[in-house]
Image (cartoon, rainbow, N blue to C red):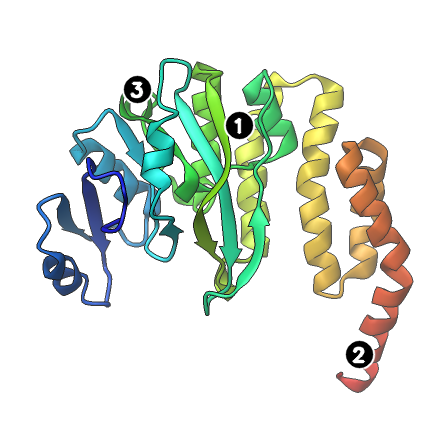
Amino acid sequence: MINQTFPNWEAIVVDNFSTDDTDSMVNAFNDVRIKIVKVKFLGSVAASRNLAVNLARGKWIAFLDSDDFWDCGKLQTVNKSLDDSSDLLYHYVEIISEDLQKIRVHKSRRLRTPIYKDLLLGGNPLVTSSVVMRRNLYLDIGGMCEEPKLLGMEDYEMWLRVARTSERFTLIPKQLGSYRIHADSLSKKNNYVRLFTLFENHISSLAPNERYRLQSLYLYGETRRLFKEGHIFKGMRQLIFVIRHGKLEYILKSLTLFLLLPLMSLKVLIYKLFGK
């Protein structure tokens, strides 16, 4: 933040049970644009973001998690795109490892209208640390959901509610930040359970063929998890469902998984026999 080439910003730092001496680090900058708020939200990222947005004074808000980064010119570049045609903007990000090694560039797709259907049936392409949106819109839709059952999905759930209000999502096709992946932030079983919970709230608005596509999106991720954990045969029925009903991208990915099944089955058998 301190090195941004665009100087007109304020930062609300929400210190939620941190143990990294955040106070001292923030105070060392001696910058009046930075405010720190200490809270105890028991790990609720949504509650922290909602508090920060309520305290913010600007017309536009952006998110930056403590382990992510913005490029120095991010705000300058985004500021050039702020106009009446956009309510929410997002950009490409670099995916990096815990030790800051580059993994790949995540090039978010350009959402098509109706945005709501694209987000719901195509999955979430928005990285939260890349999003800039109107503060009044955030407040009007009630902010991020703080329900524990949507932990880890609160951003996706909010984008869906935004899309029911506005079609004005704008992609800036430039890499303007970095998103760090941790071992414990990779997809786990509970993430798929929460994703299914999120979908349950929206599935009634879809036609039958669209419901199949939505189920396929969930089942593809669940199948990959099952295969990774060695439950090959348990994931087979789900894989077939995705091949029958999924969008082309997931059909091709599922067919690839299907072709790799003999090799995966052999690995599972070797592990069970020899523990290697």
Q: Helix, strand or loop at disc 3?
A: helix
Q: CA distance from mark 1 to mark 3?
A: 20 Å
Residue 27 vs 243, above or below: the answer is: below
User: Which picture quadrant has residue 113?
Assistant: top right
Q: Nearer the viewer, mark 2 or mark 3?
A: 3
* Residue under label 3: 140
Q: CA distance from mark 2 to mark 1?
A: 40 Å
Residue at x 39% of width, y 54% of height: 68
Mark with earlier residue (2, 3): 3
Labels 2 and 1 touching (C-beta < 8 A): no
Amino acid type, mark 3: Asp
Q: CA distance from mark 2 to mark 3?
A: 54 Å
Q: Is residue 62 left or right of residue 221?
A: left
Residue at x 76% of width, y 32% of height: 247
* Residue under label 1: 201
Mark with earlier residue (1, 3): 3
Task: Give the image location of residue 83, x and y in percent.
Answer: 36, 17
